[in-house]
Image: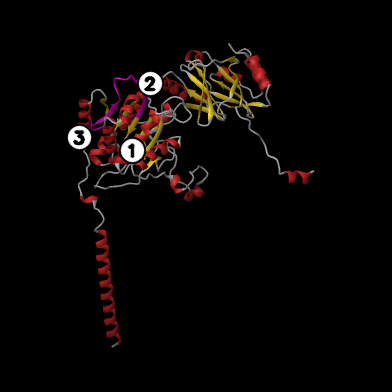
Amino acid sequence: MKTTLARTLGIGFLFIACTLASHAGDEIASRLSDMPRPWKEPARRPGFAEIAATLRYWSEKHPDMFTLETRGTTKEGLPIFLARITNKSVRDDDKQVALITATHAGAERTGTTTLMHFAEWLLGNSHEAVETRRKQVVLLMPVVNPWGYGTAESNANSQGIDPYSSQRGKAWNLDTLTLKEPGKAPEVVALQSVFDEFKPDVQWDMHGVPLRWNGNQTVESCGTAYSNYSLRPWDWRVTEAMIAEARKAGYGIDRGEADTQRLFFGPDMPPLADRLWVGRPFFYTAMYGYARYHTLLGTCEVGYEESGVARLRGLMRIGNRVWDGENIEGYPVNVVKSLVGQWVMAAGRNAAERRHSRVELWQRQGAFTMGVLYPQTDCRIGLAMALTAKGAKMMDGDTKKFVANIESLPACNAAAIRTFLEAGPETKIYFEPADRAPEDRPLNAALAIRLRIPYRNPKLCDLRLNGQPLAMDARDGFTRWHGDGYTQVQINIPPEKARQSDLLVVTCAYAPDVRRGYGWRAPAEVQEKLK
């Protein structure tokens, strides 16, 4: 009887449980009925043939602003396209160059579809699109990996090479910045050829999802790559300007390690790996442009194309405007070397000249020796930079020995430099040796030395290059302006002067426009007790 009762109760409880579960299922189903099901709709996923036909159509419809070319072919003979959008009636020599790619297209098709939407915006008549075409050359590579995009839905090509990561740098010989087996990576060769020809000021890479179904999504991010914390712009303000545009359009953007509140990994930190950001530093393909040409780079994950276009519009706006602290329009790419707050800059009368200067200086800067008067002192800045092996031999931390060394320097007023050095309290010239052996060949480009004075409107009491006084001149002399909290003083050195220079010495004495105090005093009561 007990067994029969237990069975009866068990069946009863099971019936009640099934009834409750059925009601709960009905309730959940009812609530889920309010949830849209975008995956039930067909995905708007263009094939490679549709992309190619559209690019050709735009080149025919907009010959005054759109140029299409094939930069290479895959192993299977598929074309790797490069589109060029700019106002052809405006000379290119004062335009910025921006390269926008989808290196994981490949399988991440929203990178491609974002670039196609972005191209439509660029070809439109909005004020910003017109301004961008007038001020920039915008290069688009919407499908870097056509085989992966159309055939295999793969981020790697048919040879197993991922054009985005280049096997985390293993496909490259970093000593020479060349591909080990270029025949296996025609997609990377095509991208490399674009870098080499145009030497872009900025390159941004768009990633996303395969669009396997409508509504296929990813967490949208900007600037950083989750797998590689080295693949990012050097200035977070670039990323924030792009994120601001996405937020205006109604989209939230993930900031990687900033939003997860984690520090970066380092070589002696494996025991702390669980508390550090998941990304690690690698050499990815985009970093070729940085390593060779000091190209500003970054990447985005795209879930919604409208968000991706908003971020790219924000990027274009940076190139169209004057950056914080600068006095010319363009991307922040012209600082090529620095030492304790003083900079070596690319220089030139227009964007093309500055680009030429930037590329040569960037490739040479590792052989420059740079020094500053130390300890740094208010009202005074002293800086020295050796451009050649001969100049490097003149560098000495002892100020007296340094002056003696430069007395034989052509067109140098060593006496004026000695007077400046003796007028201050500094104890030495602090200099950092070159990263590699100095070179004897002369420079073939303009350059500038930028001093940043931490006052709004100081008087320049004395400003000299190699002991010779400088006049205001944007090409061969100095310019000044207030920006980013500093008075920016730039010493401009034209190519013909740089070509003849082994060593550059800048001395600057200034009188601040406000008086600032130093140090701290204990309260009067404490001082009285200490007597």
Position of residue 10 in the picture relative to residue 494 (left or right): left
Q: For numbered disc 1, what is the local secondary structure?
A: helix
Q: How far across and how far down the image is residue 57, in percent? A: 20, 29
Between 306 and 493, the one lying in front of the other is: 306
Which amino acid type is shown beneath numbered disc 1?
A: Ala
Give the foreground label among 1 and 3.
Answer: 1
- Closer to the N terminus: mark 1 or mark 3? 3
Q: How far across and how far down the image is residue 118, in percent? A: 29, 34
In the picture, the disc for residue 94 is 2
| Residue occupied by mark 3 | 49
Q: Quadrant of residue 15?
A: bottom left
- View extreme (right): residue: 531
Mark 3 is surrounded, within 10 Å at the Cα level, by few (under 14), some (14 to 19) or many (20 or more) other residues, namely: few
The stretch drawn in magenta includes residue 86: yes
In this picture, which residue range is highlighted in magenta? 75-98
Mark 1 is surrounded, within 10 Å at the Cα level, by few (under 14), some (14 to 19) or many (20 or more) other residues, namely: many
Pointers 3 and 2 in contact (C-beta within 8 Å): no
Q: Marks 1 and 3, Cα distance to the nearest angstrom?
A: 26 Å
Which amino acid type is shown beneath numbered disc 3?
A: Ala
- The residue at the point 43 percent across, 23 percent down is 359
In the picture, the disc for residue 310 is 1
- The residue at the point 68 percent across, 26 percent down is 425
Position of residue 269 in the picture relative to residue 195 (left or right): right
